[in-house]
Image (cartoon, rainbow, N blue to C red):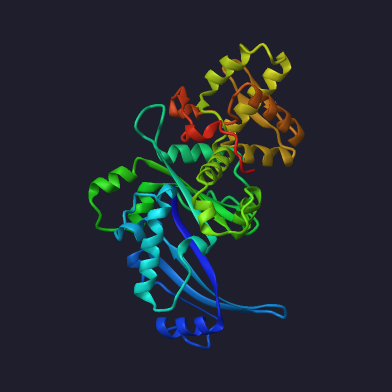
Amino acid sequence: MIHTTDVSTQLTSFTYEELQRELGAPPDHASWSTNDYSSSGLTRISLYHITTQRFTGHFIRIAMNPLHVMSQSADPMALFNPADFAELIPEFDELLRTITNVELPSLPYWLACRIDYASDACVGNSPARPSADRYIDLARRGYLPVGANNQSQAGWISFKAGNKSGSVQLYHRGPALRSRFTGLDEEIYQQADTLLRLEVQCKKGRLSSLARKHGFPDRSLQHFMTTPCIGHDELARQSRRIFGSFGYVSYRKAASQINRNDQLQRRTKADILNLLKAVEVEGGIVAAQAKWLQGAPISLHFAKQRRSVQFSNTQVLRLLRRLAQVRQHLVVIPAAWRMGAIEHPFPSFANQRSATP
């Protein structure tokens, strides 16, 4: 479930200068990068040095596709399994020896600077699991974290996971694969058309937090590779942020379930149904709340009546807690889709309690 990873190690000034000469890096540059070795799975090799009043350091950083390093063939559909880390180590170490005569540490002792965890959901294969684009549409209607870029590209959502800690991407694999790779077998493109990918990019900030959480002495790559629950938990955490913990149902089905619920008072039931309808009418909770913040009520049209509704942020939060109690999603399936229920795209992540908050 790992797509790519970046690792780094500190060098002596002598070793740094040796690497500069062997790799052809200009000696007077503070930083330098090359992608000359991308065909072997090392997508970028960078040399850089940092000088401050208190510190001077020389470093090499390598971005790689671990599966490509192991197999020496770029399979655009496959992901690296951390369980294969022991097999990756000699392949990486030997690859470096073919590039340079400079003695560098074995892979386990390089520090992790970035790890991209990923998971694919097979969609579009049944009425309860529609196309990737429809799942992305549903995600946009809910609460996306601050900074979500949900308008710039069809079939794609991306947002920052925190200050310098990483990012999250949700996208349709088919269009993404076609834009990056040409000349593949048509079967591969067709397979990608059925996949919704969730990628969680963990940078230094998040990796440092995870290292502290799990009691690691440092950010050595071996700690993250030999603790597979980290990747699963990171994906589960972001999956719940985007899709919640439940599947989706139509407004009619939600109304039936809520009206039959004995735990909710009559007024609360009415408020919940008005909230669900308002979110459907406005195309999402963010649009609905933006309207309410401007003091504008939302007009709802039912079979026998019309009504205008307006909720404060406090009221919305209270109703969200009630929805969670009755296991109902805030977003209902748009009426135009004519569907009664849609499964959670990543069911294995839906209700798991993460060990890595």
Residue at (65, 29) in percent of width and height:
299
Camera-nearest residue between 188 and 285:
188
Camera-nearest residue between 66 and 168:
66
Picture layout, residue 305 above or below residue 284: above
Give the image location of residue 171, x and y in percent.
45, 47
Residue at (52, 47) in percent of width and height:
227
Camera-nearest residue between 286 and 148:
148
Picture layout, residue 332 above or below residue 95: above
**Which image quarter is the C terminus in?**
top right
Count of numbered labels shown in the rendering: 0
Asked whether the viewer can see residue 335, the reply is: yes
Give the image location of residue 5, x and y in percent.
47, 59
Q: 17 left or right of 69? A: right
Q: In which quarter of the view is residue 242 placed?
A: top right
Asked whether the viewer can see residue 36, the reply is: no
Picture layout, residue 115 above or below residue 61: above
Residue at (45, 81) in percent of width and height:
19
Give the image location of residue 301, x and y in percent.
60, 24
Q: In which quarter of the view is residue 276 placed?
A: top right
Q: In which quarter of the view is residue 354 placed?
A: top right
Give the image location of residue 56, x and y in percent.
64, 79
Q: 27 left or right of 99? A: right
